[in-house]
Image (cartoon, rainbow, N blue to C red):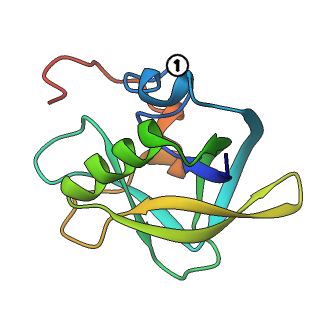
Amino acid sequence: TKTALFFAYGTLRAGQRLHNWIADEIVSSVGVGTMTGARLFYGQGHRGYPYLVVTDQHSDKAVGEIYEVPLNDAIVAMLEMEQNAGYTIAEGVADVDGVEHTVIVCEWRRGYDEPVPNNDWCSVSRSDEGWW
């Protein structure tokens, strides 16, 4: 089975609400890294999950985790679900400890609200009440 590297920056990260969607499929964890030229924002009218927006600003470094995942039915279904929710499935570059990796990332190209503090979803304290 072919594999790919996936950049998880929000609810799919370890310990987050939707990590179980990919947890059983992860072949290996490359580690926590950053995607330069990307910023995390809250969705319009809610704070339940972030949007990754490509800004092309070198100072913007979105924090996420890179996982090696198989390109199997479960991962393809997850990516299709993200795409159906409005995300664009794209290729990007993320850095872990100075090593660049080509990754699959779910980008947002529509409206959004304010930036996520520290450009790191896991650095923010929040309640999961009403997250949908």
Can residue 10 be seen by looking at this rendering?
no
Give 20 or 128, whichever is nearer the viewer: 20
Three-letter code, disc 1: Gly
Going 47% across and 63% down the picture, which residue do you hit?
A: 39
Is residue 4 placed above or below 121 in the rendered structure?
below
Q: From the image, which quarter does the N terminus lie in? A: top right
Can residue 60 be seen by looking at this rendering?
yes
Which residue reaches farthest right?
98
Where is residue 37 shown, x and y percent of the image?
57, 74
Where is residue 114 shown, x and y percent of the image?
28, 57
Q: Which residue in the structure is indicated by mark 1?
A: 15
Give 105 or 129, whichever is nearer the viewer: 105
Going 75% across and 33% down the picture, which residue do you hit?
A: 28
Which residue reaches farthest bottom?
56
Q: From the image, which quarter does the C terminus lie in? A: top left
Q: Quadrant of residue 111?
A: bottom left
Q: How many marks?
A: 1
Is residue 5 placed above or below 65 in the rendered structure?
below
Relative to residue 20, is residue 63 drawn left or right?
right
Callout 1: SS: loop
Where is residue 121 shown, x and y percent of the image?
47, 39
Going 37% across and 22% down the picture, which residue do you hit?
A: 17
Is residue 109 placed above or below 51 in the rendered structure?
below
Is residue 9 placed above or below 24 in the rendered structure?
below
Relative to residue 25, is residue 28 drawn left or right?
right
Where is residue 89 shown, x and y percent of the image?
41, 65
Query: Would you call the spot at circle 1 few (<14 residues within 10 Å), some (14-19), or many (20 or more)?
Result: few
Going 67% across and 52% down the picture, which residue do you hit?
A: 2
Which residue reaches farthest front?
1
Relative to residue 19, is residue 35 drawn left or right?
right
